[in-house]
Image (tube, grey):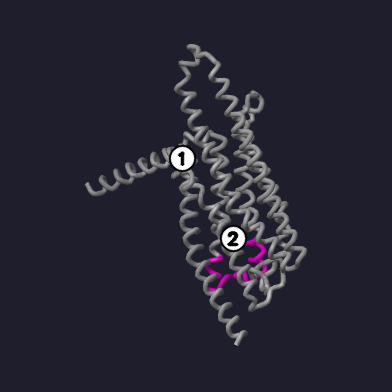
Amino acid sequence: MVVVFNETRFDVMEEIMDKLNLYLSLVVLFFGTIGNILNCLVLSRPSLRINPCAQYFLSSSVVNMISLIFGLSTRLLSSWHVDPTDTNDYLCKCRAFIVFTFRTIGIWLIMFATIDRWFLSSRKHYLRSLSNLKTVHLGIVLCCCIAIISYIHMFFCYQANLVHTPLKCYGKTISCRFTTDLVYALITILIPSILMISFSLLIIKNIHHLRTRKQHLAAVSVERLSRPRETKIQRVDHNLLRMLLIQVFLLVSFCLPQAIQKFYITFNATYALHDWKDNVSRFLYNVDVLLAFVASGMPFYLYTFTGRTVVRREFFALVGILIRRFGGESIRSLS
């Protein structure tokens, strides 16, 4: 009787996980992909193309979209139990490498965007001069190298058709799982999070010093002539900084639970097929994975709906251009 009851609870949990994978993954994939595409269009606008921080956001949107598509498309298939990465070793290894590598690149790009804002807010001319597109390109290359080197072991450690694991495509040994968990926790989450928080605090400190200093400076005629241009540039930088600080907080909040849950699963690897505690652990792990994907799909909505941001203005300007262009073509075709 107890065995039948446990099997029934297991079946209910499996059904809940399948529906969670299907509906939530579909929502996150759809809105995340659309949001990242719109981000790429908006951040490629001429007014933002020369801004180093905006270029970090643009690159992050590209890699986040790749991570979403490769990560969530297979999760949708797994809800119907037809996920090819569950049974094919090559696809399993490639999918794991792409998802973890591109997610890491996306997070490190935001970290470098934080450093760029710190450069720009510094009182030292040398540091301010480092906020340029050349530094952005070097930062992107460095992010890619860090991520690829960190997760190259996926091709040796991940394997399909596993049992008693959160996913059928998972680390094949305890040492492999521990390595992946440690790399994910340190390289993908903790180190960039600590750096983002630290540089964010330094930015706030620099801004406080700059505001205090401005109160003691008298305006001169040359500065008055250039003030409209400087004010516009400073407003763009301020908006980008506000969006960046909010994204840092949400990235840490959404990605940290998965790192903690991965360690818990590795050090409590006593899976039994019909064990209620282990099924709950698998369910929570799936929720944490979805939260991490939400972090990859939220930037556009964060940038657009957090007040009067520069991205919001550029988005509506882009919409206006598209309406005028396609609206004009429709009128000409009708006439």
Residue 22 at x, y percent in the picture: 50, 67
CB within 8 Å, label 1 to label 2? no
Local SS, label 2: helix
Q: Amino acid at mark 1?
A: Val
Q: Which mark is residue 223?
A: none
Nearer-the-camera pick, 167 or 8: 8
From what the image shows, is residue 285 above or below residue 35? Answer: below
What is the residue that sits farthest to the top in this orientation? 221
Where does label 2 land, which residue? 289
- Answer left or right for 281 relative to 300: right
Nearer-the-camera pick, 281 or 110: 281
The question of residue 193 being in magenta is answered with: no
Q: Amino acid at mark 2?
A: Val
> Which range is magenta?
74-96
Q: Give the mark nearer the N terminus: 1 vs 2.
A: 2
Local SS, label 1: helix
From what the image shows, is residue 2 above or below residue 278? Answer: below
- Answer left or right for 239 relative to 191: left
**Which corner quadrant holds the N terminus?**
bottom right
What is the residue that sits farthest to the right in this orientation? 175
Residue 98 visible, this angle = no
Q: How many marks?
A: 2
From what the image shows, is residue 81 above or below residue 184? Answer: below
For the residues marked 1 and 2, what is the alpha-carbon distance in whole angstroms?
Answer: 28 Å
Residue at (48, 43) in percent of width and height: 303
Nearer-the-camera pick, 208 or 319: 208
Q: Which mark is residue 311?
A: 1
Residue 125 at x, y percent in the picture: 64, 23
What is the residue that sits farthest to the left in this orientation? 335
Residue at (55, 52) in percent of width and height: 296
Residue 261, by quadrant, is bottom right
